[in-house]
Image (spheres, grey):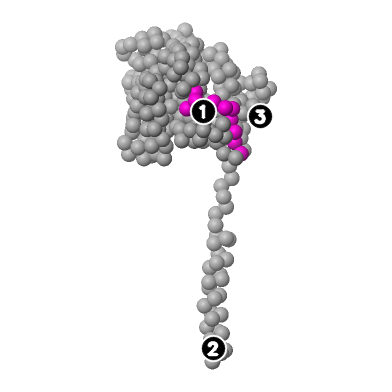
Amino acid sequence: MKYLLLLALTVCLLPCNALAAQPAAAQKPARKQAPFRWVNPLKATNQPGLSHSTFHSPSMKIDVGYCIYRPPGYNDRKNSRRQYPVVYYLHGGRPGSETKSVRLVPVIHQQIVAGTIPPMIYVFVNGGPVSHYNMPDRTNAMGEDVFIKELIPHVDRTERTIADRTGRALEGFSQGGRGTTRIMFRHPGLFCSAAPGGAGHATEKIISENDGRENENLKFSAGYNTWDLARAYAADPQPPLKILVHVGTEGFNYQNNLEYMKFLDSLKIPYQRLVVEGVPHSAMQIYQKRGLEIMQFHVKNFQAAGSISTGKHK
């Protein structure tokens, strides 16, 4: 009898032990984050007008990549003297890569071809190791400075841009929305139009309230966040910024964007809002549903600044 009980117990325990051992072997390994690189060539793409390029960073003594969309007709002889407004797009996620947001190009291209917006250049920025932040305590990690002090002047030298504030816009989503907000308040003299989207202002508030610390491993300079920079700008709002805050109602940053918009109201900083119903935390889905409105926002600001004319787009 004891033998039978022991045998039954062994039969019951064996599958349990086998099952207990299986998950560890069957679990998918954690996805490794790709190492950061300042140059990330485009994979094969048939997106019209899109190409990859580099420039040599004077500060870092290395090459830096960026992607650029040139509109139809840019290379036509008849347009050889034409200058174009530029939208600089800041990607989401960390670390940086200039290829992260190029999937928006077909939506942009479609609207330009349809004549709903005028021809514009889009530049897709590599935000650096800690996307769009300056990290002076790390090697080759001054993401904001490389963008502002090096990439913009390079693009103005090598492309037929409207090379001043009247023809320059800033836009980004998620981490890029955070970067857009910080940079527009730090450099209002560089951009006549700014459209931060889906920004993680809750994290930026943590940074503001904890002496620049986002977490135990990441600390920024004091005041280097979307909350403190908005306060500084509100004290001297010159030149005036044209701002469009956009976010999807199903995105995880929706509520903290509503809170941030109330904060801007309290500072009397004017802005427009674009709340996209039923859309998650996705720049692509926002662009597919309401992207034309974001593009038209920039166009109206270019027109108001006098860099492009009103009327039929060609």
To which residue does mark 1 refer?
225
To which residue does mark 3 refer?
137
Q: Relative to residue 20, is residue 220 depicted above or below?
A: above
To which residue does mark 2 refer?
4
- For the residues labelled 1 and 3, the Cα–Cα distance comes to 17 Å
Residue displayed at 38% across by 24% down: 266
Viewer-nearest residue: 246 or 310: 246
Q: Which mark is residue 253?
A: none
Whether residue 215 is visible here, answered yes or no, is yes
User: Is mark 1 in CB contact (under 8 Å) with mark 3?
Assistant: no
Q: Which residues are magenta?
A: 217-229
| Residue 214 pos. (x, y %) | 55, 36
Q: Is residue 114 left or right of residue 216?
A: left
- Name the image quarter holding the C terminus: top left
Q: Secondary structure at mark 1?
A: loop
Q: Is residue 184 left or right of residue 246?
A: right
- For the residues labelled 3 and 2, the Cα–Cα distance comes to 69 Å
Residue displayed at 55% across by 60% down: 26
